[in-house]
Image (cartoon, rainbow, N blue to C red):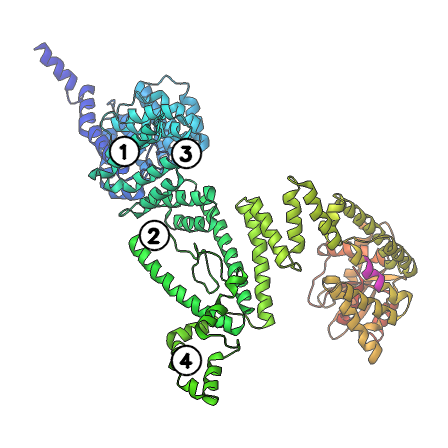
Amino acid sequence: MTLLLGSVILFGCGGKGYQNMTARYNGYFYADLRLSEVMEAIDDGYEYNYNDILKIYPEIDSGVINGNKSKLEDAFKKASQVIEWHKSSDWVDDSYLIIGKIRHLQAEFALAVATLQYINQTSDDDDTRHAALIALMRTYMDASDTTNVEEVVNYLDLQDLSEENLINYKITSAFFHQRMGEMTEMTQDLSLVSDYVRNKNERSRINFILGQISQADGRNTEAFDYYKASLVGAPPYELDFHARLNMQQVSAFKSSGDIEKIREVYAKLLKDGKNKEYQGKIYYEMGQFEKKQANYDLALGNYLKAVSVEEPSARQKSLSYLRAGELYYEIYEKFELASNYYDSTISVMPKDEEGYDQVLSRQLVLSDFVKQLNIIRVNDSLLSLAELSPVQLDAYLDIYLDEKEEEEKEAAKKEARLNTGVATANNGSDVFGGNTAGSGQWYFDNEAAMSQGELQFRRQWGDRPLEDNWRRSVKESFADNTTDTEEDDPALQAKIEEAEIEETGARKAEKDKLLATVPTSPEAKAELGLASQAAYFKLGDIYRFGLEKVDNSATTYQTLLEKYPETDFRLDALFALYSIYLPIDVNRSNGYKNQIIQEFPDSLTAKLLINPRYLEEKEARDKRLQGIYASAYNAYDNGEYFKADEIIRSALASFEDVDFLPTVKYLAAILKAHTENLVSYESALTAYTEEYPEGPLHDEAKKRIEALKPTKSGPVDEEFLYSEDFNQLHSVAIIFNHELNNADSLQNAIDTYNKANFKTNLSTGKLLVDAQKKTTMIFISFPTKTAAEAYQGRLTKDISTLPIQLDINFNNFVISKDNFRVFFDDAQGKRDVPLYLKFYKRFYK
């Protein structure tokens, strides 16, 4: 009776025991179950990349989340019901934790953070608080909030965590370090808990990851032990398979017998029917194993088998192509073939593969290498063929077409026997675009080969004259000069008919097409030569900087200089050779240095080779010349033309090889108009435009020359009404609409402005400019042009402070005393503001 009464008290509808039981088994249990099912779906749907260090946790896939939307909604609902209906139970905080995790999965990071922080701030249960903070770390990580992740880590490092929370914390911390690329810290975290993880699949994955890290660091014994530990507890087959496969790579062996045993293990794995989908991976690992033993041919064979298996994965296939390409690049140094495999790699490699950008970079370098090599081959070939006699060329084309047909037949047979899917980039382009990779010397590479066409001709047709259109010649000769003997010669007649038949149909069309590619004009030959020169130089650069093969690079630059001694790339090629040999052969390097100095003495390269401080010293000279120019221009600006001319003459005699010199020479030309005459002025401007054929000062000089034409051949241009004598009084003129602005009020305002801003007593005046346009001028007088310009600059900045309304007729300029009179002379300047402004813009700041 007492026990029954206690049960009623404990589990009564209002008791906490009842609340806990109902909350846990009616709400929290099913919410947690649904969440676990979604997490399992994420793991099942994630494709782990066993060629790289496995991710500790799978990335959250929005597609999986959307596909499990109903489960998440049900879990959220049940967790919410616990919070709402069972407020006094011990499962409220745990339900909030489920809601926080759901919001994280749905990428509602702000809400997830708020929920998890709420648990940490309000919960009385330390374990739940710590679990919430661990979940908060994952949320911050996916929200890319590294700073807050580190703050949580710093806090949890100081807490006394339960065993379960400690394991979860260290794994989550390791995941954070993995994302940050901090492998050492990641290894430390995983090593602490690898033996204590309760979930057997998770424990196997952690041990496998530790094995991968140890293998990458070269700690093979340790790696072997971790891989072996990952097999405990019957892990998923994919992990089991890759662990056993990797164990072969890190196995210790002391004799050739041990190596054979490992090969036997690979052979068994290949025969096992369960491994059919992993055959590409097995062959790949066999290649890696043989490469480690320096059995490069065997390794290459296995890589090619790896890409030939039925339905290999794109990722695995790309890595097999890559390893084959690396062998051709690093071991065999056959860069054209390496380019093929790198092309194939990039065509199938997922962009999230580790090192993708580096692979792409090398593929682009190799592709450019092949491009330049083919330009050289094709152009050099065409230029060589252009030197053949018509008979030699015709016979060569026959041989070429015959060989091409045979090669195509052989290629078709080979493709049928073995289709590896390797990219078929044309790495050995012949003169007409055919593929000659693997063949011997080019037809044009030596004199014996070059004369092959002629020999073939003589074998078939006898010792006949080598002339153009020889078949027609034979026929005409036969018709016009036949003898009984020749008419009775059936062999000769058959050969002529055979030749005519050969030239008909598709073959003749193809031959004509090939002939059209052979350059005949000097211009076409020169164009191919220039393209080859550029390709040689680029190829040298690629060898040097892209492939880092300095010897090949030097040979290529030297070949360029030997074949094309007058090339535009001569200076750059010589300097490249100087730089290449400087650290390894000083005498040879100095030889190229002396060549540069002798052949290109005015080049910047030569000047720097002679004097490494050349640019520094030149800059100092430039600054000194600018200072002298400033003095000359100041004299010119003040109308002291002879003084300015004297300064300029002295500077030109003292300075050379200075960037500022064109500006000084331009001022010297302008001064001729004031110190000599218009003839000297025009001559100086013309000489300037010839010496400096481009640039803004060249354009200004041309304008001045054009402006002189009316002066010499007709009525004076209206611009020349105005005097260039600036050594006199000047005024600042303000032209405004007197209907919009009261002239007297504005003049008073300007007087007030002058008194407030200038110590000098400035006088102002006022004149009507144009009654029809309703414009008036207020002018302020100054003793010099410089003073007027300074005032105008200040006034322009402050114009908004004056009580003036602006319109299209408003203007503000500086004008000399003489030009002031001309401006208001109705017979000359006619108060034409635009006309004066043309003069003003040329001579005033």
Name the residue nearer the viewer: 257 or 702. Answer: 257
Q: What is the magenta range? A: 664-669
- Distance, label 4 to label 1, CA atoms, is 68 Å
> How would you rate the neighbour count of disc 1 (Cα within 10 Å): few for under 14, some for 14-19, many for 20 or more?
few
Q: Residue at x 63, y 59 (%)?
A: 564
The residue singled out by tag 2 in the image is 421
Q: Which disc, if any, is residue 492?
A: 4
Is 438 included in the stretch rendered in magenta?
no
Q: Given the image, on which type of amino acid does mark 2 rest?
A: Gly
> How would you rate the neighbour count of disc 2 (Cα within 10 Å): few for under 14, some for 14-19, many for 20 or more?
few
Mark with earlier residue (2, 1): 1
Q: Given the image, on which type of amino acid does mark 4 rest?
A: Leu
Coordinates of residue 423 in the picture (x, y in percent): 38, 53
Q: Is residue 508 above or below residue 400?
A: below
Q: Residue at x 17, y 22 (%)?
A: 18
Q: Please state if 568 lies on the left or on the right of 406 as rendered.
A: right
Q: Which disc, if any, is residue 264?
A: 1
> How would you rate the neighbour count of disc 3 (Cα within 10 Å): few for under 14, some for 14-19, many for 20 or more?
some
Query: In the rendered image, is residue 817 in sight?
Result: no
Name the residue nearer the viewer: 600 or 231. Answer: 600
Q: Given the image, on which type of amino acid does mark 3 rest?
A: Arg
Coordinates of residue 591 in the picture (x, y in percent): 71, 47
Name the residue nearer the viewer: 495 or 670. Answer: 495
Q: Secondary structure at mark 1?
A: helix
Contact? badges 2 and 1 (CB < 8 Å):
no
- Distance, label 1 to label 3, CA atoms, is 38 Å
- Distance, label 3 to label 2, CA atoms, is 35 Å
Mark with earlier residue (3, 2): 3
